[in-house]
């Protein structure tokens, strides 16, 4: 039992690496891949390894600090968990994912009669401002 409690405490302990990872996600303003998190966090923690990023992302997701944004056929991206319900735009050129403000509303009217909508996700695809120019 003491071993389990020690490992839980170690996962929740603040470290320079974990702080750098959280800062990278918070400062990005958009969902990041693990590789993007790693690259951004290196400014704060130059010796940070990619394996540490993956472990920290898993721990931060389990603790509810971040959420995974799933893109079919691609690795998940990660963003702050406190953003509330919103949707995403993916650039078809650079493959980056961007947050969209707001939601068009209740999608229940689109469901077939007798169906119950429990949640929805909307993904727009196109070119981001940088790739469109």
Image (cartoon, rainbow, N blue to C red):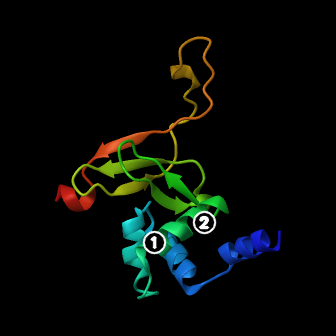
> Residue at label 1?
51
- Between disc 1 and disc 2, whose residue precedes? 1
Point 65% across, 81% down: residue:
14
The residue lying toward the viewer, choosing from 32 and 4, is 4
In this image, 119 relative to 51: left or right?
A: right
Residue 60 — which label?
2
**Can you see residue 18?**
yes
Residue 60: image location, x then y, percent: 60, 66
In this image, 107 relative to 77: left or right?
A: right
Q: Residue furthest left?
A: 133
**Label 1 SS:** helix
Q: CA distance from mark 1 to mark 2?
A: 14 Å
The quadrant the C terminus occupies is: bottom left
Q: Residues within 10 Å of mark 1 (few under 14, many from 20)?
A: few
The residue lying toward the viewer, choosing from 9 and 35, is 9
The quadrant the N terminus occupies is: bottom right
Point 52% across, 77% down: residue:
23
Residue 22: image location, x then y, percent: 54, 74
**Label 2 SS:** helix
In this image, 9 relative to 44: left or right?
A: right
Residue 82, picture quadrant: bottom right
Answer above or below: position of 25 versus 67: below
Answer above or below: position of 116 versus 19: above
**Can you see residue 27?**
no
Point 62% across, 12% down: residue:
114
């Amino acid at each position: 039992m003491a071993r389990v409690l020690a490992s839980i405490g170690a996962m929740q302990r603040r470290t320079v690496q974990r702080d750098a990872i959280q800062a990278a996600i918070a400062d990005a303003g958009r969902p990041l891949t693990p590789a993007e998190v790693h690259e951004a966090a290196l400014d704060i923690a130059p010796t940070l390894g990619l394996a540490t990023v993956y472990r920290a992302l898993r721990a931060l997701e389990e603790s509810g600090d971040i959420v995974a944004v799933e893109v079919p056929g691609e690795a998940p991206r990660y963003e702050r968990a406190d953003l509330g319900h919103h949707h995403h735009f993916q650039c078809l050129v650079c493959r980056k994912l961007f947050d969209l403000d707001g939601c068009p509303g209740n999608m229940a009217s689109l469901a077939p009669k007798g169906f119950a909508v429990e949640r929805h996700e909307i993904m727009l695809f196109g070119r981001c401002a940088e790739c469109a120019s």
